[in-house]
Amino acid sequence: MNTRPTNTATPPAGRELLRVENLVKKFPGVVALGGVSFDLHAGEVHVLLGENGAGKSTLIKCLAGVYQPDGGTLFVDGEKVHISSTAHAEQLGIATIHQEFNIVPQLSVAENVLLGRPPRRFGIVDRRKMHAKARAALQRVGLDVDLRRPVSTLGVARQQLVEIAKALSLDARVLILDEPTAALTDAEVDRLLELMAELRQNGVGMVFISHHLEEIQRIGDRVTVLRDGQSVGTVPATTDTGELVRLMVGRSIEAQYPREQTPLGDELLRVEGLTSTGHFEDVSLSVRAGEVVGLAGLVGAGRTEVLRAIFGADRYDSGTVSVRGKAVPRHDVHAAIGAGLGLVPEDRKAQGLVLGASVEENLGLAILRAATRGGLVDRARLREQARTSVKNLRIRTPSTRATVKNLSGGNQQKVVMGKWLAADPAVLLLDEPTRGVDVGAKVEIYQLINQLTASGRGVLLVSSELPEVLGMCDRILVMAQGRLVGELTREEATQDAVMALAVKEVESSRAH
Amino acid sequence: GSADQGGAGSTGGTAGAGGDHTLGLAVSTLNNPFFVSLRDGAQAAADEAGAELTVTDARDDATQQADQVANFQTQQLDAVLINPVDSDAAGPIVSPLIAGDIPVIAVDRAVNGAEVNTFVASDNVEGGRLAAQALAEAIGEKGQVIVLQGVAGTSASRERGQGFTEGIAEFPDIEVVATQPADFDRAQGLDVATNLLQANPDVVGIFAENDEMALGAVQALGDRAGKDVFVVGFDATEDAQAAIKTGTMYASIAQQPEELGRAAVEAALSILNGEEVEATVSVPVVAMTKDDL
Amino acid sequence: MPTETATARTEQRESLGSRAQVLLGQNGALVALVLLSVVMAVLSPVFFSTQNLLNVGVQAAVVAILAFGQTFVIVSAGIDLSVGSVAALASIVTAYTATTTGLNPLLAIVVGLLTGVIAGFISGALVAYGRLPAFIATLAMLSIARGLALVLSDGVPIAQPSAVAWLGSTIGGWLPVPVLVMMVLGGLAAFILNRTFAGRAMYAIGGNEEAARLSGINVRHQQLVIYSLSGAFAAVAGLVLAGRLASGQPQAAAGYELDAIAAVVIGGASLAGGSGRAFGTFVGALVLAVIRNGLNLLNVSSFWQQVVIGAVIALAVLSDTLRRRRA
Amino acid sequence: MPTETATARTEQRESLGSRAQVLLGQNGALVALVLLSVVMAVLSPVFFSTQNLLNVGVQAAVVAILAFGQTFVIVSAGIDLSVGSVAALASIVTAYTATTTGLNPLLAIVVGLLTGVIAGFISGALVAYGRLPAFIATLAMLSIARGLALVLSDGVPIAQPSAVAWLGSTIGGWLPVPVLVMMVLGGLAAFILNRTFAGRAMYAIGGNEEAARLSGINVRHQQLVIYSLSGAFAAVAGLVLAGRLASGQPQAAAGYELDAIAAVVIGGASLAGGSGRAFGTFVGALVLAVIRNGLNLLNVSSFWQQVVIGAVIALAVLSDTLRRRRA
Ligand SMILES: Nc1ncnc2c1ncn2[C@@H]1O[C@H](COP(=O)(O)OP(=O)(O)OP(=O)(O)O)[C@@H](O)[C@H]1O
Ligand SMILES: Nc1ncnc2c1ncn2[C@@H]1O[C@H](COP(=O)(O)OP(=O)(O)OP(=O)(O)O)[C@@H](O)[C@H]1O
Ligand SMILES: [Mg+2]
Ligand SMILES: [Mg+2]
């Protein structure tokens, strides 16, 4: 089976910073890395590409000193090293932005940027210096917020920017970025890629992980493809997308957005004049059977808040939500689910998963009530359901009993999807459902959306990936500053049309 | 019912002696029936005299007692009766009162390091000796015995234990094979006695530093109580007296808590009325066996 | 060749080891319990007598029953400090209603159990609807229940009806009822945790309350159930204790909350919630009882006893965590 | 027009309200404390006398000092059950070294403080390196320290040297030293929490231990510091207590751990870690002291007192959470 890795890329001119040979890392029941080799040169952006669970994050955690590899050798500046801790990695000039956020929610933005290394004398923290340093780091990523604000009050996107600023402030020679763009919108992605180009100019070597192939081509120099913990090849980033996908998935993918429209049925969800002071105002929308409605907008437009309010997760001040003509009481998730709603939240770790519980338990969470008779849970049924979900969604896990915490990020996202598909809601509210999901799996999720609408369900989709909204939605609503500012049909919708609406409102409000 | 009506209800008796004196009684703990009786005795005496009595409960915590006595002074009570949680700790607690010319009467336990007006007490060490004699008598002055101790470090445990050790030393054929703490608690008395009997099957006598533990030991003995193994307790609580009557307990050392409370209040009122009072007022202890009931 | 054989042997050893791990790994406290029992047996000849082992069972019973109820709370990331006081209150209420109102003793027991449920329900309501930290809500209940027990009994023990005393007796000359009750309630707790909606909800709430809420679990409602269950278990513990003493003691079970929580944590649960099993809790309670029983048998001096208890608890749990870390 | 004015007025009211919120919102317990004090003042004329307020301060001091140390631990998502026992041990060690070895009393005090640090250090090592749950490690230390205090003192209180007794005295005829010590240690705790690396690391570890570790904070090392600090504060509390009683009591401060934790939680910290402030803890300790003092002044019967204490604690924290929810 072990096909020889293709190696068609010539390493760039810069000096070699980092080399990995035959790296092996095993977890109980899983060989996460089965002999990966790869190298990084100064002034290079080396992309790691692979399906969810291929071993990308595990590889970089070995580089960052989080995991100790079980085999293989690591060279830094040509010298064999053993990276014993994260602090050691930092000493070697390696900074890492991990896939999972590593923020301390209660601490301020400034403290998070300089977490673990605030400027200090005799153990006493110099706040002024700390703020100055943090401000400088945040400026580089274009984030302008009150430094004293607890970081938990920022949305996911801006938390990601804080993480990036944190890694940048280390001034490392090697910067590892594990899916930094997953939580960002286009404007911020542009800004980040510019920043990376700048760093490349300064001779920094970067390891970059992303499931967005277009980003890879924009910023990457070489691409190393991982499959099942093996490196299957290193190719130039200019390699054609289809070929990259084939290397990664082992097959080619025809349609990236395989939307199959179905004739529309009755109205399933109706939202009328929904208002939550300070968050959004007068939002009215409807979703019909067989319809995928998209909610587009910039970060902070309030899309997440609207979804959560519809679902009863947050309070709102006025307006009504009804499903199949029946009013849904406000601020009552239980009732919303009973009425036929489901929500895949944007932050899977904090809101979607019980991380310490098994795959089976997580997949059964939304149908726990339904699987209960006389107070007793039919666990056999839940187990069966979990096996089916794992198979249908191709969740990569050693067993349904594995702890969700140990799954790769993309597979965790699939578990959240699976939980709600099992509950079979009339209308599924999706908030960034493909965040961190690989290209192959994305298509699988889109197929699931198709199945839902084909069976007369409705979908309300929030996504910061414009192509996804354009490709999958039958109708697109654009939000800006907490208001609906326009509606586009599938035919009318283009990237420019959506952006024009999303930005116009922002600019007109700036003019005031 | 609760005894804290503060004398408001029952001033009917012999009014006059107490006048409108206000007294404070700082009890070490009301979680023990003994001190509840002591309080009842004091309350009855105060009611009879028409004095107002404020009672506080330190829950066996010397610091709380310090706080409560300080609060008495703030309230400007006429005299303070203290049943110290700890004798040594009570010195600094009452010193400000004495400095402020407020009469202080120690009840049941002495106050060390300060000159109180009078000390009303029964003798715990003497009680321990009496217990040793009673137990020796029950077991025919020979055999193995075990001791259940109260909360380590409390004066009651120390003094009763000391008296018992001294007393039992006079009987050369009696051997104390185990001494273990059961914290004055009935449930612990039961468990610890069970365990000790397991390790020492030949035990014929048990001394417990209070009746609660003694009753736990009786429970642990089951049918053997009063037949093969004799139990002597301390305090002669109602439960213990009942057990002595049925023969499961051999004896208990009776203090007279109500008498203690009554004597203390009477001493306080005498002082407030300008009368002379002895430096120590002794309330006798007696070994109570079936014959006494 | 020799290398290969060596590898094979290592593998075999590993597989044996891993099988043992499956047996013990699920419940590390079991290792501690076995170790502890072996040490005690070596030091004291009577330790392994049937009678003494039953004694250990009886002495573990009250804490174990409290701890089963506590397990529900801890699995759901809460804490219940009131269990000892609620146990005392329930036993006093039973004794009081039976003696003063002359109610049928069995009905009096029901009233006592209801008292426990109500106390738990109030704690639960304070946590769920009052948004009080569980620590504060149940600390308040600790104080309130103890106070009420004292008020009702006027600080004096009350005799229990014989129906309660039966709970402290022995069946067939050898099986102590407390042990029986402990077994039954342990089985019940395991059943609730593993098989019922309420039980599965406890794990979900303890693991990630927000995710549980967003999955349609009515978290507040479940919290009422959880604390009520803890109150009910506490009431049973109180009655068993009362049965053993044949009297309702207002000061009974004081401080037992720490023992109950310790039993749950020794049994492998995390105070952060989301984990814990009834069997682990059972073993945890036995560990504590064996330590106390053993120290009595060995007649360790009373002052040193506290030092030894502390050290042994630390060592017992340490042996478990170190073993797990090596694995 | 009228509408506009109304709006303006509402806004103004809101801004006044929000300013008050800034003052009080940061520390909700303050609201509870103020409410409580007003009620007490209405019910008892002596409550607001200078002497009584100083009494409250003195009565709060020991718990407050323990709670300051506890704040470090709770902010870092731990718990320290041993503080009461460690306080007793430190005071006994001081009294013992001063009386039996005849060491200079000031040196004896240093030895006492060191004892506290060592006890805390051992708890910390059990948590950091032994991977024991903090609850178990410090429960073990609770038992060990209390046992050692009993062993050393032989269960009998030991007289303290006058240097210690000074800690319980009054300066200039009105300022009680315990209050002074409480203020100084409160300031120190605030300084450590807000300004030092160790303090910020406490928040980081408590808020997200994994993130703290990945950011290069030596979590284990910091845990040693945290528990040692808690031990040191406990030792100071023990000495203040000993000063007030002029004697080293082996049973001193028993059960104070729950009060100390309660003070921290009432002060707004979460047992889940990551939040908590020294000032909040101070207010929390005052709330507890005011409740006890007030109930004494009002001469509430002792059994009912426990009921009332529980109810008032619940109400005090409830008033805070409800206020916050409305906001
Ligand atoms: N701590 C762990 N314990 C057990 N298994 C683990 C652990 N961490 C990772 N794994 C497993 O190792 C494999 C590789 O995971 P990894 O997180 O490296 O994937 P990835 O390539 O980063 O995927 P994604 O694109 O979804 O982030 C997965 O099968 C995962 O389940
Ligand atoms: N860049 C920003 N500037 C100011 N406020 C912001 C910004 N981003 C977010 N917010 C605030 O945070 C709240 C939550 O934003 P959130 O990111 O959840 O909104 P969203 O529209 O769902 O965007 P997304 O889902 O893309 O993250 C918003 O209501 C807004 O008030
Ligand atoms: Mg990954
Ligand atoms: Mg969003």
Image: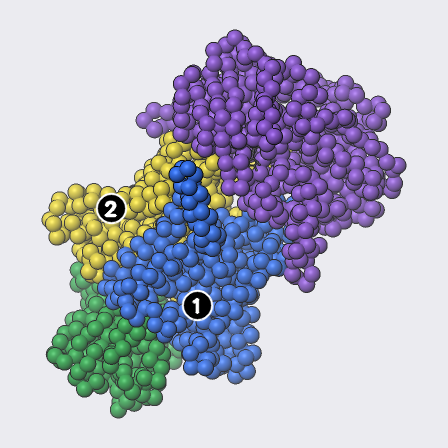
Chain colours: A purple, B green, C blue, D yellow
Which one is nearer the viewer's eye here, B284 or C115? C115
Q: Residue B270: in sight, yes or no?
A: no
x, y percent for residue B278:
16, 74
State the residue at coordinates (53%, 50%). C274
Q: Residue furthest bottom?
A: B291
Question: Is C95 drawn above or below residue A39 in the view shown?
Answer: below
Residue under numbered circle 2: D115
Q: Estimate how packed mark 1 is, as few (under 14), some (14 to 19) or many (20 or more) residues with alpha carbons within 10 Å.
A: many
Residue under numbered circle 1: C62
x, y percent for residue D57:
34, 49
Question: Is B140 drawn above or below residue A140 in the view shown?
Answer: below
Label 2 marks a residue whose chain is D
Q: Estimate how packed mark 2 is, as few (under 14), some (14 to 19) or many (20 or more) residues with alpha carbons within 10 Å.
A: many
Quadrant where the C terminus of chain B is found in the figure: bottom left
Q: Residue C62: in sight, yes or no?
A: yes
Disc 2 element: helix
Quadrant where the N terminus of chain B is found in the figure: bottom left
x, y percent for residue D21:
54, 39
Left or right, B61 with respect to D209, comes to: left
Which one is nearer the viewer's eye here, C272 or C94? C272
State the residue at coordinates (79%, 48%). A327
